[in-house]
Image (tube, grey):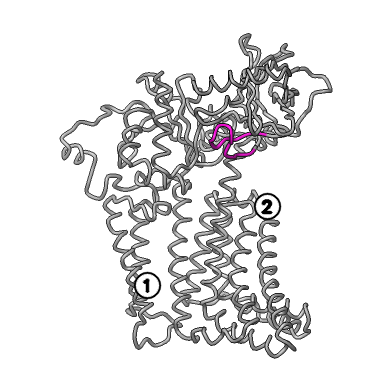
């Protein structure tokens, strides 16, 4: 009612002003993807000061932009939803809510497949525009798209190029930024950890002494210190750029999800960890250090740069494993992550060196070198060893080899952190440790924290969810005993004195332990069952090596309000995009995204379905749809807030019931 009153009031104002306002002009074009596939492109040119609203707006807001295509004659088929540009999101002064809108121009694209003989597609767009103080009533504009083989049609280079441009730009950008910030933060902390190692920490006073003697004045010393810090950053940035350049920004991500590269990463981290524990040292050739040292004596900017390079080479036995681990972790993010990681790492190292070189008096506040530096190095070795098994677990999950199931993974971590606790308490000594006369308060405190963490993990062997580390071990259903050690489904039913809520499982279904959610891993079988029982479908695009998927399944799904819906109100279809099991011979088809290549694995089939139909390729990705395979509500990605996820489920189900 509020909206209707607003519209009529605005209409009255416009009539009273005796003028026709038409701030949006629409133009259409067609992009040819293949002989049967086209993109219908609708471009809006918007007058200055006016806002055209997105296709998705909050309730009680303005009318969303909506496209309707007339496919009543059956000459073409609509593929997926109409995509739109990133736009802007602000607190709208008219409707007093956060709304996404476009200004100046906006382009919308809809993919279709056509049959022979069709030359035109008709449709219309309904939209609403506002400026900072007023809105126009909803408007409909007819759209016409010419489908022909004439030269005025634009041809794209490849269909995969178009697909990549259309894929969920908003969510991809947001997730990418969050991932890069995470890499930067981890790398920054890793840089400080590297400072507290025997190869790096003692070099701080040596560096300060060099700049104090070489600089003729305090100002010159500060300038040289800044150049020195920048040189350290540049050296590590060049390493990140080299890794990205050699492998390619997108190739790193692909490698990180590959079984064999996960195994190689596991081996590398075990080697790094073994080095930190004192078995051997990873060192660059001494000739490199000698040549760089000779260049450092030249003085000036070149000399300072080579001195920074000498630091990187001489300290490699301590920084190398950390840098290697960072690059491995960055590979799982792809894109610019290796460069961002090296920037964070080098910044953390460069800041103390530059600051102490600029202000030598601060050296008095530094603790003296000693055996505690090797303790830091050993602790890092244990952490790298624990992290290594994450990569081995991912390879095992993708292969479905059931070699490293949940209980085995947790047992390994209990052994690693339990041994670390004994080490910190002085019960174990390693090759490069100094004689321990007593345990410091800091070492005792860290030992107690590690011991507490070790004890916390023990119940995980009996089925405890272990929410603090949910991103690392395999999911609970990937287990020798999904319902906990010594606790079977039969025992659970007997204890609750209840029958299996699902009775005999339908074809293709299984119970997702430990919460007994009925789930399918096949789209067609799940959809058929949903139609049979009259429930909506929830598609869960997931992955065996997907960290955020495990967080959702272990932290959000078990909540009573969410679990009740998943068990009783929807039919869950979990599609694993990294499932490496081969497709049946009759299911092997040519990829629509990469013409000329065959879909060989089950995961490729589901990944292509997600990309083509939903314009998204990240996991987790949740879709609520009806029996007509149309979305009941806009899909969502990673949603760790239980209330938001529950609200999304309820809205979708309520629309299904209408």
Q: Is residue 99 magenta?
A: yes
Q: Secondary structure at mark 1?
A: helix
Q: Identify which residue is drawn at 64% across, 50% down.
A: 251
Residue at the outermost right position: 151
Between marks 2 and 1, how big is the CA–CA gap? 40 Å
Element type at mark 2? loop
Instruction: Give above or below for 123 relative to 379.
Output: above
Report whether 486 appears left or right of 632.
left
Along the line of sight, the residue nearer the viewer: 199 or 272 = 199
Q: With 10 as the anchor, is 378 left or right in this view?
A: left
Residue nearest the observer in this picture, 649 or 612: 649
- Which of the image's four quarters has the C terminus? top left
Residue 624 in sight: yes
Q: Quadrant of residue 627?
A: top left
Q: Residues within 10 Å of mark 1 (few under 14, many from 20)?
A: some
The quadrant in which residue 504 appears is: top left
Residue drawn 40% across the image and 50% down it: 474
For label 1, the residue is 446
> Start and end of the magenta stretch?
88-102
Please tell me which residue is depicted at 75% across the width and 23% down the height of the picture. Answer: 27
Q: Which residue is mark 2?
A: 248
Q: Residue at position x 48%, y 41% from top?
A: 620
Pick whichever, 358 or 517, lies toward us.
358
- Identify the mark nearer the N-term, 2 or 1: 2
Q: Most extreme residue toward the front, as rendered? A: 16
């Amino acid at each position: 009612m509020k909206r209707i009153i607003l519209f009529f009031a605005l209409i009255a104002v416009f009539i009273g002003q005796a003028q026709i306002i038409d701030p949006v002009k629409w133009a259409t074009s067609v992009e040819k993807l293949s002989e049967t596939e086209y993109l219908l492109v609708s471009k809006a040119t918007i007058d200055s000061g006016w806002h055209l609203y997105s296709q998705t707006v909050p309730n009680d807001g303005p009318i969303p932009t909506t496209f309707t295509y007339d496919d009543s004659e059956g000459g073409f088929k609509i593929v997926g939803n109409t995509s739109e540009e990133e736009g802007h999101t602000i607190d709208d002064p008219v409707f007093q809510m956060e709304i996404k809108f476009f200004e100046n121009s906006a382009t919308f694209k809809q993919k279709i497949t056509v049959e022979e003989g069709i030359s035109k597609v008709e449709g219309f767009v309904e939209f609403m525009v506002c400026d900072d103080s007023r809105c126009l009533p909803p408007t409909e504009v007819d759209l016409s798209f010419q489908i022909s083989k004439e030269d005025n049609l634009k041809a794209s280079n490849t269909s995969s190029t178009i697909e990549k441009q259309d894929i969920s730009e908003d969510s991809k950008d947001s997730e990418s930024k969050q991932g890069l910030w995470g890499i930067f933060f981890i790398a920054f902390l890793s840089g400080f950890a590297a400072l507290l190692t025997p190869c790096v920490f003692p070099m701080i006073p040596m560096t300060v002494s060099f700049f104090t003697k070489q600089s003729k004045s305090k100002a010159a010393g500060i300038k040289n210190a800044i150049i020195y810090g920048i040189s350290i950053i540049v050296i590590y940035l060049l390493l990140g750029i080299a890794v990205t350049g050699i492998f390619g920004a997108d190739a790193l991500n692909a490698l990180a999800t590959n079984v064999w590269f996960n195994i190689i990463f596991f081996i590398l981290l075990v080697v790094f960890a073994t080095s930190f524990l004192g078995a051997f040292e990873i060192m660059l050739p001494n000739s490199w250090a000698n040549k760089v040292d000779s260049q450092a004596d030249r003085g000036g900017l070149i000399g300072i740069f080579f001195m920074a390079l000498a630091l990187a080479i001489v300290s490699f036995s301590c920084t190398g494993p950390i840098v290697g681990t960072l690059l491995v972790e960055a590979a799982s993010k792809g894109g610019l992550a290796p460069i961002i990681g090296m920037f964070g790492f080098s910044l953390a190292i460069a800041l103390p060196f530059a600051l102490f070189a600029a202000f030598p008096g601060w050296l008095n506040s530094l603790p003296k070198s000693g055996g505690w530096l090797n303790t830091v190095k050993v602790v890092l070795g244990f952490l790298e060893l624990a992290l290594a098994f994450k990569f081995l677990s991912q390879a095992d999950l993708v292969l479905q080899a059931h070699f490293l199931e949940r209980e085995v993974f947790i047992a390994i971590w209990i052994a690693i952190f339990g041994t670390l606790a004994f080490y910190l308490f002085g019960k174990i000594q390693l090759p490069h440790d100094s004689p321990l006369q007593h345990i410091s308060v800091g070492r005792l405190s860290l030992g107690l924290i590690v011991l507490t963490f070790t004890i916390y993990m023990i119940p995980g062997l009996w089925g405890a969810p272990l929410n603090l580390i949910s991103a690392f071990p395999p999911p609970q259903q990937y287990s020798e005993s999904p319902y906990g050690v010594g606790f079977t489904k039969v025992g659970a039913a007997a204890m609750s004195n209840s029958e299996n809520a699902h009775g005999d499982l339908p074809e293709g279904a299984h119970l997702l332990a430990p919460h007994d959610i009925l789930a399918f891993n096949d789209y067609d079988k799940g959809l058929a069952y949903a139609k049979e029982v009259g429930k909506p479908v929830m598609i869960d695009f997931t992955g065996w090596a997907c960290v955020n998927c495990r967080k959702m399944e272990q932290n959000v799904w078990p909540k009573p309000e969410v679990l009740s819906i998943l068990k009783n109100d929807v039919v869950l279809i979990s599609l694993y995009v990294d499932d490496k099991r081969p497709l049946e011979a009759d299911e092997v088809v040519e990829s629509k995204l990469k013409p000329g290549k065959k879909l060989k694995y089950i995961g490729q089939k589901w990944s292509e379905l997600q990309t083509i139909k939903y314009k998204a390729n990240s996991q987790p990705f949740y879709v609520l749809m009806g029996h007509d395979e149309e979305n009941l509500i806009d899909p969502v990605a990673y949603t760790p807030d239980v209330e938001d996820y529950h609200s999304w489920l309820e809205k979708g189900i309520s629309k299904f019931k209408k």
